[in-house]
Image: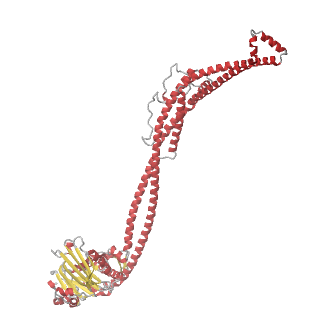
Amino acid sequence: MVITRLAADNFLKFRRLELDGLPSQGLIGVTGPNESGKSSIGEALCFGLFGRTFALGPEAPDKLLHWEERQCQVTLDFEGGDGRSYRVSRTLDADGGQGASLTLLEDPGVSLAKGVDQVGNAIPGICGFSFDEFLESFYFAQRDLVHAHPRSEAVQSMAGVTPLVAAEKDLEKATETQKAQQSRVRGDLEETRERLDELQVEEGTLDRLQGLEKDRQTLAYDIDEAANAMDGADEWYRRKRQAYDQARRLRLFLGPTAAVILLAGAAAGAGWALLTYWPDHPYADRLLLELEAIPQWGHFESYLPWLGPGIAALGVVIGIAGNAFARRSRRLKRAASTLGKRVVRAREKLIPDAESLSHRLDEFIAATALDEHTRPQEPAEADPETSISSAQDEPSEEEAVETTPGADLLYRLPGDLAYLGNRITDFRADPVRVGETVSALHDVLVRAQNELEGHRQHLEQRIEDERGRRAEADRLQVAIESSEGELAAIERELAVKNLAGELLTETARKLSNQFNQEVRELTKKALPVLTDGRYQQLRLGEGLEAEVFSPEKGDFLDFDELSSGTRRQILLALRLALSKELARLSGNQTNFLFLDEPFAFFDRERVVATVNGLPQVAEELSQLWLSAQELPEPATVDREVPCLAQSDQLVQTSPASRTADPVAAASGLATATTEPTQGNQNKDSDKDDEQTGDG
């Protein structure tokens, strides 16, 4: 694209600025002393296109206004990369308010875009470059004479790696976010593992506690049953022993009696049979004589046939009674045997089992208790009425019985309970001794019940706590597995992102190298022309850091090793190469380049060589703007725009443009026609130009 007209009101140096009929090809020389407005023209071009300038940012809009003015306006006519002519107009007030419009010159009534945002979005598409790219290619200010290489953002955009760099930055941000998430998940995982370790949950603890509780319940049931059996057992033994003795005596009496009566009945029956069926038998006669000797036998003779059966029946009845008492004796003996076995079992099994279980509960709960809430309390002082192991009082003489060597265990009990149990089974034990024994056993069993009940509370609490700890451990384990899965997924995603980052970096590097190679080739043509053939080969780094080959040294020189003039020539060559490359990438057939004071530190020979050599090395840049205090002979330009430090108005028009542009023709502004000039001779022709306000 090229500029065809520039107009501004109240912008920076100029209260009124108009440059019309600008040549689309050739050199446009903007000359004048310091503070004459040369840079203001370049800033006006920049502001007209993009609504901003390099020197003054959007944070200080009032600095773009002419002194003591409240509003400025810049209008720019240009030919776009598509060959069509456009006009962009921008306004700015002291409060920072902006306005913008974009139209086609051939159809000014139709607005292509209106408003700062719409115009700002449309301009890069028409021009083929953005603001940053413009500053780093088509706009060369004095600031660029001190930088060894251009800004990386613009180079990246020109090289086509901006999307890759943006994607890489987004990827880096996502990676950092994911690394922070990874760190957080790792921290949560470690914290969860520590909490799980602090719980110290062991496999089988809950099962063992439940097993102990089951054993306690079974033993408590047996002890309760035995204690109930011991309660009143002494009185039962006394009564049942009396009943057993009575039944035993009756059994012993009735048994022989029944036998004798049965024998008598059998004898009576035999006598009746002898007298009835064998009356002639000698024994029958003798029996009859014996019977007749009985007084009043005659009265009983008729009952003789019933005497035998009657006596036999009586014997049977007595025998049955005796058998009943025998059965009663056996039942009582079995009941006594049960009592004896219970006494022996209570002393030999239940009480030791209670002691053993109590110790096991104490040891296990103490070993597995993790805090004061679940840790068993210290045992209180022994209470003679409630503790198994508290029987310390010596028995009285009346209570003294034979004791076992283990009298310190629970209670002073008979030493040979098995022997006593056998005697109880046979009802041969002394009721007093039995009473003392079962009473002592009852007391011990009751105390065992109380102690087991106390353990029940601790055990149930411990089981409840263990279940809670187990549930918490299961929850933490699920959280650990979830965190481990999340961490593995994050690590996989990070690996993918790292690979994507490497691919993006490598692709961007290749594109940058390719772009640098193209810029290097373009620089080879400009460098000999701008340095008068002294330097011909330039080497560029990935960021376009420049090194130049020195024939005298036979090696590449760092940029800082060169003289300031040579450095500026090299930077100008590099800028021309960047401009030509961007022109090629944008697809524009014609392009302009604004060089603001590029010769500030050049000697006369360098200025002449540079001005005359520019058209040879910048064929793609058809319109070249040069800003300088003066152009020495024999440097030539196609149009000169002289600026005066004492004037705030500059109007330069041509008859052709005045006719072609109805807007400019209607404005009634003074015009001037400027022909190509040579060196300082151009200034002599300035007297023929009509410049408003000595512009």
Q: Quadrant of the C terminus?
A: bottom left
Q: Where residue 441 sits: x, y (%)?
A: 53, 27
Check the image and report above or below for 443 versus 368.
above
Q: What residue do we see at 47% from left, 55% from top?
A: 481
Colour option used? secondary structure
Residue 274 falls in image quadrant: top right
Check the image and report above or below for 507 versus 205.
below
Check the image and report above or below for 268 versus 5.
above
Q: Is residue 562 left or right of residue 183?
A: left
Q: Is residue 193 left or right of residue 630?
A: right
Q: Nearer the viewer, residue 412 or 557?
A: 412
Q: Is residue 283 left or right of residue 175?
A: right
Q: What residue do we see at 55% from left, 29% from top?
A: 229
Q: Nearer the viewer, residue 486 or 228?
A: 228
Q: What residue do we see at 59% from left, 23% from top?
A: 240
Q: Where residue 649 sits: x, y (%)?
A: 16, 82
Q: Would residue 402 be seen by someone viewing this image from the given angle?
A: no
Q: Nearer the viewer, residue 427 or 578?
A: 427
The mark tally for this picture is: 0
Residue 27 falls in image quadrant: bottom left
Q: Nearer the viewer, residue 6 or 276?
A: 276
Q: Where residue 638 sits: x, y (%)?
A: 25, 89
Q: Quadrant of the N terminus?
A: bottom left
